[in-house]
Amino acid sequence: MKTMKALWGRSARALGQLSLSVAATLTTQAALAVGNLPGGPAVNQLDLHPPVTQIARDQIWLHYFMLVICTIIFLGVFGVMFYSILKHRKSKGYKAANFHESVKVEIAWTVVPFIIVILMALPATKVVVAMKDTSAADLTIKTTGMQWKWGYDYLKGEGEGIGFVSTLDTAHREMSNSGKPAGDNYLLKVDNPLVVPVDKKVRIITTANDVIHAFMVPAFGIKQDAIPGFVRDTWFRAEKVGDYYGQCAELCGKEHAYMPIHVKVVSQADYSAWVQDKLKAMAALADDPNKVWELAAMMERGEKVYAANCVACHQTTGKGAGPIKALDGSDIVVNDPAKQINILLNGANNGAMPAWKQLSDTEIAAVITYTKNSWSNKTGKVVQPAEIVAARK
């Protein structure tokens, strides 16, 4: 009886622990529950993204057309094979035929595959040629991949002259660091989305500053490598207003997962309004490089630049991580402003520290000043934009 009670007690405790474990699992799953993201990934998605361009629709049609042909070939070949094995097996008294050099068989297995290849090649070639026709674009945008963000420069069309960097939203990085993801757009939200007008042909020119990246937006049916020193291009014409998401599709380093793409397709009227607002904002930020800044104002400006461009590697504490060198207590940061300026303009460690020439003179001066006076680096030094102008020459 005592043995039975002991066994019963242990079983009850085990059952209780199992119940707690199941409850914890269900609670965790509920906390991590997400829904479909319009223009982005869907829960348990098996098919390709819903298309919003003609090219994407053609790709989906081509995908299923090829799948049907391959399925028919598979069923035909294996159907004949298994039928022959079962129907003409030796146990039923059949004997293998002994023949060779059949002209009819030779003609059949040459002509039939040739016809199949032609049937597959013609529509595929038509789609591929259409994908590469970037002529007569209404808008041309240069997309520059860099570790780990995207730079957008509007080169031609309405909005010419606009340029900005698109970075993963800092709140999402904090979610990733804490292990508490939330939201349907987790790791897809950016600070500055790419904005384009609906029903306009947009040419995307891709390149990169450091390593190979790839610009991919599934709903548009585009994926184009961005290679340092090379210029590639692709295009799309979005037919529906909305938000569409993609990611860098080429493994580009430890922050590869934090390099999302957000394209906002808006009406022509909204796009024109966005262009005017953006140009005004850029004009307001076009600081006079000869202006002499006070420490407090430079620190405030530098903190924003650091949060947008530097915190991913050097962390909010300035301590860096792994091979990323710390800025807090760094001899270069504290004592060698000329070398620090050179590193920001030209990069260092074979691209591990990228060049930041795309930032304005004031932005570079501000972020250097910020690092010199943050954490334990209380130097009291202010780097002025004029020093960056001189270093660029």
Image (tube, rainbow, N blue to C red):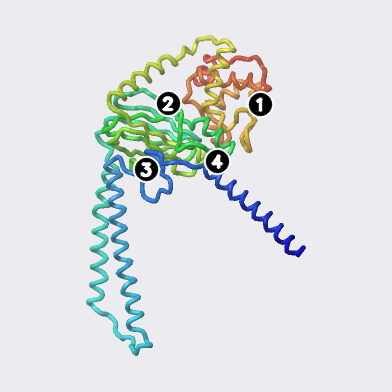
Q: Secondary structure at mark 1?
A: loop
Task: Tell me the kind of residue under disc 1.
Answer: Asp
Q: State the residue lying farthest toward the front.
A: 1
Task: Tell me the kind of residue under disc 4.
Answer: Lys
What residue sits right under mark 3 in the picture? 218
Q: CA–CA distance between discs 2 and 4?
A: 23 Å
Task: Tell me the kind of residue under disc 3.
Answer: Pro
What residue sits right under mark 2 in the picture? 164
- N-terminal of the two: label 3 or label 4? 3
Q: Residues within 10 Å of mark 2 (few under 14, many from 20)?
A: some
Tag in front: 3 or 4: 3
Q: Residues within 10 Å of mark 1 (few under 14, many from 20)?
A: many
Image x and y of residue 152, in percent: 40, 29
Q: Tell me if 124 is positioned left or right of 250 in this view.
A: left
- Residue 208 versus residue 27: which sits nearer the camera? 27
| Residue under the image location 23 percent in, 77 percent down | 103
Q: Residues within 10 Å of mark 4 (few under 14, many from 20)?
A: few
Image x and y of residue 168, in percent: 49, 32
* Residue 185: mark in rendering: none
| Residue under the image location 48 percent in, 31 percent down | 167
Q: Residues within 10 Å of mark 3 (few under 14, many from 20)?
A: many
Q: Quadrant of residue 156?
A: top left
| Residue under the image location 43 percent in, 45 percent down | 43
| Residue under the image location 32 percent in, 70 percent down | 77
Q: Quadrant of the N terminus?
A: bottom right
What residue sits right under mark 4 in the picture? 254
What residue sits right under mark 1 in the picture? 328
- N-terminal of the two: label 4 or label 1? 4
Check whether the beta carbons of the residues at disc 1 and disc 3 lie within 8 A of each other.
no
Q: Secondary structure at mark 3?
A: helix
37 shown above or below 151:
below
